[in-house]
Image (tube, coloured by chain):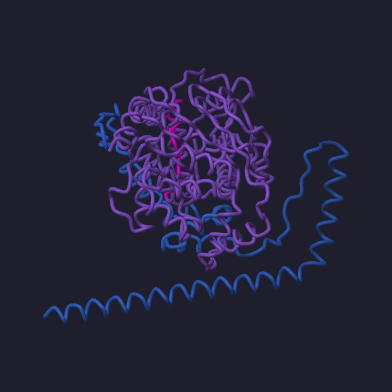
Chain colours: A purple, B blue
């Protein structure tokens, strides 16, 4: 097959957002399955400024033919932000304003022109994630052979008419989990055959379990969270819970954070917190392997890449009951527990720290689940079963 | 565990563990402990401030949160043991200085905190009373509805 993937950012050597990582991985899976794969993206690197930091052009990365296009520099950011603010506050926004929001979002006329000219020769066009202008615009060009990789969240943007139109017009969607598919069906009144759950390949790794604790001289057990530190990921709740936990348990455990962001840390938690910011993949995996539990309190995920990585490291998970996708993963894998409020969090964390056998069994279950479900061959099988119909 | 995905069937879980049952077991234990007052702690009420938006539809959490609020509602304006981590004459001097500062602070702010405590107490009582009244009203409406449904079935 001849495939084209479209995503807002692509860094040949670095790490970008979860959805972009997922799309790159699906492109890689397609290359390894022997297909011709192109990937269209922008010249932007920073997801705040979206300025064109690299030159437009083409290069081949891991067998993927990557095409870089400039983001429209005449986008009216003022209009975009004004409408975005209305959407974010869940105020009624007319269809015209929704369209203006999309046009002034991250769009690329050069990319759309290329797709109009060359898109006819491709067997399938795969675009995502759902809320970028580049996705909304590209999906319209050859909608009859466009598959969405939406990475859908239950948020105000998902309830826009123009997003619903995109779901209805496209050929179908590749979802990351059953709850994500159920959300799309509920929001857009779609049929059950609107798409399939595919996910992305997870590569196994082997690291020293002791290395992280030795490097950072940690002499007590620690729990870990990796990812953006912000309200949207529920990090303030994790900090509040750990604050109460270390006070009530007299500091029996430390909290390790990796990833970007800046959330206020309670004063009394500071001695029990190790916030490393960005770390290498190797160090992240070592941190995961040595942790007593991986805590992911987010209630708005479509897949949960870091959760699956923690399971590959053999570490059990503790997630929020209202995080439908993460809870779904925990139930399917039999590899994690889910809490509703602090007393349950405390009791579950106590259990994971004290019951070594339970901890090992949960971690091992998680590892086996990821190795079986998200092996590259299994992903390729699911992906091409969908694309070949 | 048997995993039934779209295109495969895999047997997992060497330990025959059922996490849903384990979560239920832990929840039952927590519920029992809560009734025994193990979690009546202002630090827990404080920890839930970010959780209410996710669990706003949970009657159980609301009841629990009200209990936490009741426990932590009053600002503590009593004297407390003033200490300093430094030892020797420097430590003793600092303790004396902090004691004087605390007494002054208490003298000038006592009236304000006292009034604040009265307001906090009244507000929690009002919230609790509303909650209880609505609970009673809903229970009585449910009872009436069940009776009406029973009558129409006859």
Residues A58 and A33: in front is A58
- Identify the image quadrant of the C terminus of chain A: top left
**Residue depicted at 55% across the width and 61% down the height:** A87
In the visual, does A215 lie left or right of A366?
A: right
> Residue A281 falls in which quadrant of the image?
top right
Picture layout, residue A160 above or below residue A356: below
Picture layout, residue A303 above or below residue B102: above
Residues A19 and B106: in front is A19
On whether residue A307 falls in the magenta region, the answer is yes
> Residue A334 falls in which quadrant of the image?
top left
On whether residue B48 falls in the magenta region, the answer is no
Q: Give x and y (percent) for residue A377.
A: 34, 25
In the visual, does A251 lie left or right of B105?
A: left
Picture layout, residue B74 above or below residue B146: above
Asked if residue B55 can be seen in this view, the reply is no
- Identify the image quadrant of the N terminus of chain A: top left
Q: Give x and y (percent) for residue B11.
A: 25, 29
Q: How many badges with numbers are in the image?
A: 0
Q: Give x and y (percent) for residue A56.
A: 63, 33
Q: Give x and y (percent) for residue A114.
A: 53, 39
Residues A234 and A243: in front is A234
For the magenta stretch, what is the residue range? A304-321
In the visual, does A227 lie left or right of B22?
A: right
Asked if residue B24 can be seen in this view, the reply is yes
> Residue A12 falls in which quadrant of the image?
top right
**Residue depicted at 71% across the width and 61% down the height:** B78
Question: Which residue extends farthest left?
Answer: B154
């Amino acid at each position: 097959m001849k495939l084209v993937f479209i995503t807002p950012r692509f860094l040949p050597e670095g790490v970008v957002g979860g959805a972009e990582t997922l799309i790159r991985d699906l492109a890689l899976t397609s290359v390894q399955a022997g297909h011709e794969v192109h990937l269209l993206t922008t010249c932007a690197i920073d997801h705040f400024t979206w300025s064109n930091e690299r030159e437009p052009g083409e290069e081949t990365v891991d067998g993927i033919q990557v095409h870089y296009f400039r983001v429209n520099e005449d986008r009216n950011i003022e209009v975009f932000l004004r409408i975005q603010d209305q959407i974010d506050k869940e105020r009624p926004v007319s269809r015209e304003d929704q369209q203006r929001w999309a046009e002034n979002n991250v769009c690329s006329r050069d990319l759309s022109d290329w797709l109009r000219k060359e898109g006819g020769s491709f067997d399938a066009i795969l675009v995502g994630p759902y809320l970028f202008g580049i996705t909304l615009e590209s999906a319209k060009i050859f909608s009859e052979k466009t598959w969405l990789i939406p990475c859908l969240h239950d948020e105000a943007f998902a309830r826009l008419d123009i997003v619903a139109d995109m779901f209805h017009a496209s050929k179908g969607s590749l979802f990351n989990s059953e709850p994500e598919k159920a959300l799309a069906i509920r929001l857009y009144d779609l049929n059950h055959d609107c798409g399939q759950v595919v996910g992305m390949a997870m590569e196994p790794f082997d690291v020293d379990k002791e290395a992280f604790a030795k490097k950072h001289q940690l002499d007590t057990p620690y729990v870990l969270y990796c990812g953006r530190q912000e309200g949207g990921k529920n990090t303030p709740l994790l900090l509040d819970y750990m604050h109460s936990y270390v006070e009530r348990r007299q500091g029996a455990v430390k909290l390790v954070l990796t990833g970007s962001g800046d959330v206020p840390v309670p004063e009394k938690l500071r001695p029990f917190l190790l916030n490393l910011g960005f770390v290498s993949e190797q160090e992240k995996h070592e941190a995961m392997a040595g942790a007593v539990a991986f805590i992911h309190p987010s209630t708005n995920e479509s897949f949960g890449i870091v959760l699956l990585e923690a399971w590959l490291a053999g570490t059990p998970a503790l997630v929020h009951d209202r995080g439908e996708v993460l809870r779904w993963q925990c139930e399917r894998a039999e590899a994690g527990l889910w809490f509703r409020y602090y007393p349950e969090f405390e009791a579950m964390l106590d259990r994971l720290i004290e019951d070594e056998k339970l901890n090992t069994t949960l971690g091992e279950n998680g590892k086996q689940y990821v190795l079986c479900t998200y092996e590259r061959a299994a992903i390729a099988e699911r992906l091409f079963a969908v694309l070949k119909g | 565990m048997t995993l039934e995905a779209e295109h495969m069937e895999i047997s997992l879980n060497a330990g025959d563990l059922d996490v849903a049952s384990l979560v239920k077991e832990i929840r039952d234990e927590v519920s029992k402990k809560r009734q025994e007052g193990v979690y009546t702690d202002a630090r827990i009420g404080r920890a839930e401030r970010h959780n209410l938006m996710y669990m706003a539809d949970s009657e159980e959490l609301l009841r629990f949160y009200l209990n936490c609020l009741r426990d932590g509602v009053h600002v503590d304006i009593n004297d407390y043991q003033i200490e300093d981590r430094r030892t020797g004459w420097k430590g003793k001097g600092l303790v004396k200085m902090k004691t004087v500062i605390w007494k002054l602070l208490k003298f000038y702010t006592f009236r304000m905190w006292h009034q604040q405590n009265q307001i906090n107490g009244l507000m929690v009582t009002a919230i609790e009373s509303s909650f209880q009244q609505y609970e009673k009203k809903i229970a009585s409406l449910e009872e009436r509805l069940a009776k009406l449904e029973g009558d129409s079935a006859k």
